[in-house]
Amino acid sequence: MNRVLGLFQRWPFAFAMLLCAVLLVVNLVVSPSFVSPSRLGMTLATLAPFVLVGFASTPAILSGGIDISVGPLATLINCVFVAILIPAGLGDWPLAVPLLLGIAMAVGAINGVLVAIVRLHPVVATTGVLFLLIGASLTIAKNPVIAPDNWTRPLAGSIGVVPGAIITLGAAALVWFVLKRTVFVSNLLATGESDSSAYGSGVNVTAIRVLAYTLGGLFAGIAGIALTALLQASGSTLATTYALLGLAAAVLGGTSLGGGRGSLLGTFFGALAIYLLQQLLTSAGVQPNLIEFTYGLLLIAGVVLGATLLSPRISRRTA
Amino acid sequence: MTTQLSVATPTPAEPRYGIWPRTRRLVLQQPILQVLVLGVVVVWLLVTVPGIANLRSATALLIIASLLSLAAMGQTLVVILGGLDLAIPGYVIFGAFAAANLAGGQGWPVPAAFLLTIAVCGGLGATIGFLCHRLKVEPLMMTLGMGAVLTGGTLFLANGNYASAPAGFLRGLAGVTSTTFGIPIPPIILIVAAAAVLLWLGLTRTPAGRSLYATGINARAARLTRINTTAVWTLVFAASGALAGIAGMFIASFSSGWAQSIGEPYLFSGLAAVLVGGTTFGSIRGSFTRTLLGALILTGLSTIIVSNGLAEAQSRIIYGVIILIVVALYGRERHVRDRF
């Protein structure tokens, strides 16, 4: 028993992974067609924006801050593409992808500058930006605009035999994989664990923070593209829904809000667990309101378990 | 009002005399800036929308500002403590449900609805506060989960019935045309004003208020001075829940009904009111008076924006800009090199 607990404590995302495995089995029992090849593309496409928004909130949390504005940023990118770029004739992918990701990274960088250089409290800075982004999305497309046929459609279906969502998820994972080979990620974790120690060891804390938020912006941009692929319309009203889902996914995946501990893989399992739970309850015919109820309970239980059984008893910091 | 406490501010060595440092200190300690901005907003409102200068419109504006500040009252306390309460929408929805479906539709007596709201929202809030402090977890996730639990649970109980009107007595408290003992001011405005005075006295003149500020600035130091920080956390989150629940009852009574999305705006606008007022996380300068000013400023601004033909979307953008400017003016944190 102690060895199992030790395993959980060494791998913070083991809990989310176990939860995923259990939910997957129950899902398969309730509706066996759940992972049939014909539905796999659609399932992954629904999952992708979810996971990507979770990815987007992870670097900021790892750096010891928090970014509430990534969900609204994803919907802004969705609105910009559907309601501005396509009508203006800029909708081809060689032009649109750099443009959208550029905007997303710029917004992320603004968050980073506000947090690291203007030195606002991360919650305050990103709440301010959240208002700006929600306002901008509503200004661009107050009512849903239906997108004409465009290059994002295969991303929600399949390209050849490969499900399209693998490309959006894979792009984000590849960026993280490459960055893990550089000094950036270890400096990021050091900054999150203790910024004054990192500063004392010569880490450029300010630059690391700005880069962390910029990276979050990039992931949010990819999430916006995945969202467009799924909706094929502009969904400015989804902004607040996604705002808090990403945070929930990251924390359920073992990323510590104090900063310095966690991983993108954990976030993936966190998002997957939330998605599988919703899927299970929906296919079991439970009311949508009770699904929200259960999701809340899962979140509380996850946080409480993470803080009691599953946390190593070293370096508990005072809140 | 926080002058007595200012001794404890960890100000770095800076010149204490001369006009500039003194003005700066005054602006930091008292919400002078907010009062000035409020003055500008009122003048601007009167110039661009002259038709607003009658009793009816002014009352309506004041009611909206009162409801916003009542919903943000608990959030103010939580922010002073250094946390954030994301469960506000859940509390507001439960309050609205109690006012409309229980007291209105099912004919519960109004005091019973009040007690139920306070017991449920306050009880759940207390649980969050206790758990967060005991387990040393950020209140962000716990309150987010609790908000989802409350919203989902309440909507399930309501079972799609949003049609019943709140009880007549409650509508009398929050209606635009209501009077208080013959004075043409709706009771809700006076209730919020009275609560503001009580809270101001409580925060600045009682040991409980001092414990709250001390815990917010440094929980460890506060515990070492024998303040029961667990009790402070439990009570503050309980108060946040109960106050937001009561605000929800009045919000439903003011708009004579409710909807699924009634709570969400009050979370973000309420937080905006707290921040624009100048209360920052774990600070001694936070107070409800500031939130009141913030709520008035935001209500005035969104009225100007909407009556100038701009949409709700533009007012969101302006909210965001104002939050960033106000907090950049005096909510800045120290550089890493100064925190060794």
Image (cartoon, grey):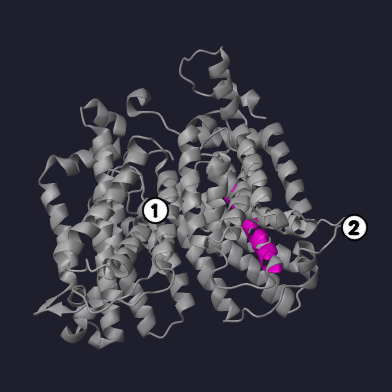
Q: Quadrant of the C terminus of chain A?
A: top left
Quadrant location of the N terminus of chain A in the rendered image: bottom left
Whether residue A304 is situated above or below residue A111 in the rendered picture: below
Identify residue type, mark 2.
Answer: Phe
State which region is magenta.
B235-253
Q: Is residue B250 magenta?
A: yes
Q: Say few, some or many: other residues with alpha carbon within 10 Å of mark 2 (under 14 / 14 to 19 / 20 or more).
A: few
Q: Is residue B205 above or below residue B114?
A: above
Question: Is residue A169 magenta-colored?
Answer: no
Say which of B10 and A308 sits in front: B10
Q: Residue furthest right?
A: B182
Viewer-side residue, B131 vs A57: A57
Quarter assignment of residue A147: bottom left
Name the residue that disc number 1 marks: A68
Q: Residues within 10 Å of mark 1 (few under 14, many from 20)?
A: many
- Residue B107 location, x and y as percent? 76, 78
Q: Find residue A130 and report its horizontal and vertical position in percent.
A: 42, 54
Residue B279 pos. (x, y %): 55, 39
Residue appearing at x 57%, y 53% in the figure? B270
Task: Give the spatial CA distance, label 1 vs label 2.
Answer: 46 Å
Q: Quadrant of residue B61?
A: bottom right
* Tag 2 subunit: B
- Residue A5 in sight: no
Give the residue at x 45% y 71%: A292
Q: State the SS at label 2.
A: loop
Q: Residue at x 38, y 54 (%)?
A: A69
Q: Residue B181 shows which numbered tag?
A: 2
Chain letter belonging to callout 1: A
B255 on left or right of A298:
right
Q: Main secondary structure of the magenta part?
A: helix
Q: Secondary structure at mark 1?
A: loop
Q: Is residue A54 left or right of residue B50?
A: left
